[in-house]
Amino acid sequence: MPLSPPHPMLWTVQQNLFSALPKKRHCTDPVHAGNKIPRTRTISPLCMDLQTDYSERSQGKLTARYGNIFSVQFGGLTFVVVSGYQMVREALVHQAEIFADRPHIPLLQEIFRGFGLISSNGHIWRQQRKFVSATLKSIAVSFESKVQEESRYLVEAMEEEKGQPFDPHYKINSAVSNIICSITFGNRFDYHDSNFQELLHLLAETLLLIGSFWGQLYNAFPLIMRWLPGPFRKIFRHWEKLQRFVRGVIAKHKEDLDQSDLGDYIDCYLKEIEKVRGKYLWPPKNEQTRLKATLLEGLFPLLPLSCQTF
């Protein structure tokens, strides 16, 4: 999806906003005295060419100038760049507990509300990870059969081309997505199903917009950007449609839930909710709301991954 480049005036506004932001004193020494990770040097992106893509070459120049650990301040976000084998090993192995938390990304927080697998921290994240790991192991015996079944549909779809050249992206993308849908929703979709194709389109465009310039600008200045128009507004419109779809799937699973049958991912999740209701996962008064939020965050990161497979 082509996105128009930002107007030069926007850079001026962005620079003024950056300058006007209150500067917080961040602790650049994340561990106790005597640690092997030195204090960071903070640089402003306004001193850099903002329209230059970040790459290994540009990182190499910054590393040569500022050392193996430095931070980049962009609006309300601070990015810490660690490079070099010894420094990375020290951070991710010897100091793993300190670097274990998720970053606070405003756009993802706005969408996922801090629940599920990729946006949560602490107790909620541990509970979700434990459940997902155990559930995938319990239903793993059906994975092979679902892949084989979808492979047959994929071959049939390719045979429809009658030996003529064609772009395989659409069919392979649909096949991979269908395998994930079979595991999570319990059913597959026809490749020509308009609702299925709209679902994939919404997910792909949402993912593209989140990673675009506008998505990053929202993350840097969330309090201002949430009141402004722009292409990033599609993210929230698309997400509302995706929520409606998932609510319908959850409601159908609740109606047909069979406690004696292992079922799919959602069935297992609903059974687990009943098992631990009111104990420790969520406050009872918010249980239904948080169930929907957790399922949305837990299920839909799987589908965009398939959209990037080919």
Image: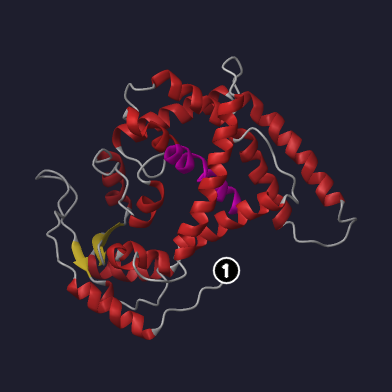
Furthest-bottom residue in this view: 8
Q: Hey, what amino acid is under mark 1?
A: Met
Magenta residue span: 292-310
User: Which element type, helix, strand or loop, lies under badge 1?
Assistant: loop
Percent position of residue 36, x then y: 18, 47
In the rendered view of the protein, which quadrant contains the C terminus?
bottom right
In front here: 162 or 232?
232
In front here: 164 or 218?
218
Q: Is residue 188 left or right of residue 245?
A: right
Asked whether the viewer can see residue 29, the reply is yes
Q: Is residue 261 left or right of residue 4?
A: right
Name the residue rendered at 50%, 22% in the picture. Answer: 271
Please name the residue that numbered disc 1 is placed on.
Answer: 1
Percent position of residue 124, x then y: 34, 33
User: Where 103 sits versus 74, above or below?
Assistant: above
Task: Check disc 1: other Cα within 10 Å, few if <14, some if 14-19, many if 20+.
Answer: few
Name the residue rendered at 51%, 40% in the picture. Answer: 299
Q: Which of the 4 quarters of the picture holds residue 201?
A: bottom right
Number of marks in the rendered image: 1
Residue 155 falls within the magenta-colored stretch? no
Name the residue rendered at 55%, 22% in the picture. Answer: 138
Residue 294 falls within the magenta-colored stretch? yes
User: Where 228 sits versus 111, above or below?
Assistant: below
In the rendered view of the protein, which quadrant contains the N terminus?
bottom right
User: Where 46 sits versus 60, above or below?
Assistant: below
